[in-house]
Amino acid sequence: MRLRPRPIVALVLATLALSACAPQREPLDTAIPAAFLASDLGITAAEAGTSMDGFSLNVTASAEFDPDAAAPSADDLRTMLRLVVENTPQNNVNTLEIYGSVGPYEGGNAIDFGALGVELGFEDDNPLSGFSAPWDDVVELLDQ
């Protein structure tokens, strides 16, 4: 049996054309900080990135808050969680961590996002006053 190259080439070209038309997402290391800064949370600087722990992908985001603004609340943390989930293209994330400070990271006062997470129903198991939770639990909270 002889293969016909035209149908195969047409299929490959159609696949490439469809993938080129698909919406491209901004990488989370720029999308999450941009979303934080565009929010009305009083964030003056932000960073985000990923790390691997074995086969597990972890997302970490951090934010500096304006010292003259009100202290972040549990609702503010919920907003930050939503912004992270909305701007994270990976669906195989294991853990989400959020850290923050009032003023610059170095010398700023750390925000106890772990305590704010408890107000949202999470356990405070992050010894560094950050928020840490399984990704699926965050998504479930936001779906409520």
Image (cartoon, grey):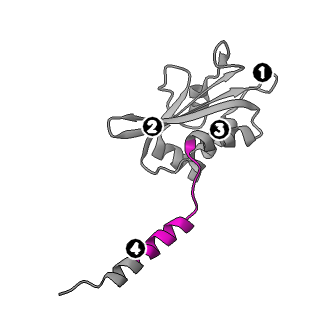
Q: Tell me the residue that label 4 is attached to.
A: 12
> Is tag 4's residue or tag 2's residue first in the polypeptide sequence?
4
Front of the two marks 4 and 3: 4
Residue 29: x %, y % from top left: 57, 39
Query: Which residue type does callout 3 highlight?
Result: Pro
> Is tag 1's residue or tag 2's residue first in the polypeptide sequence?
2
Residue 50: x %, y % from top left: 48, 36
Label 4 to label 3: alpha-carbon separation = 36 Å
For disc 4, the neighbor class at 10 Å (few under 14, some 14 to 19, many from 20) is: few
Label 3 to label 1: alpha-carbon separation = 18 Å
Please tell me the numbered disc located at residue 67: 1
Query: Which residue type does callout 2 highlight?
Result: Asn
Q: Residue 62, relative to residue 134: is it above or below?
A: above
Query: Which residue type does callout 1 highlight?
Result: Pro
Check the picture and name the quadrant holding the N terminus: bottom left
Please tell me the numbered disc located at residue 58: 2
Q: Tell me the residue that label 3 is attached to.
A: 33
Label 4 to label 2: alpha-carbon separation = 34 Å
Contact between marks 1 and 4 (CB within 8 A): the answer is: no
Near-viewer residue (44 or 115): 44
Does 71 sit left or right of 89 as displayed?
A: right
Badge 1 marks a residue whose secondary structure is loop
- Labels in figure, total: 4
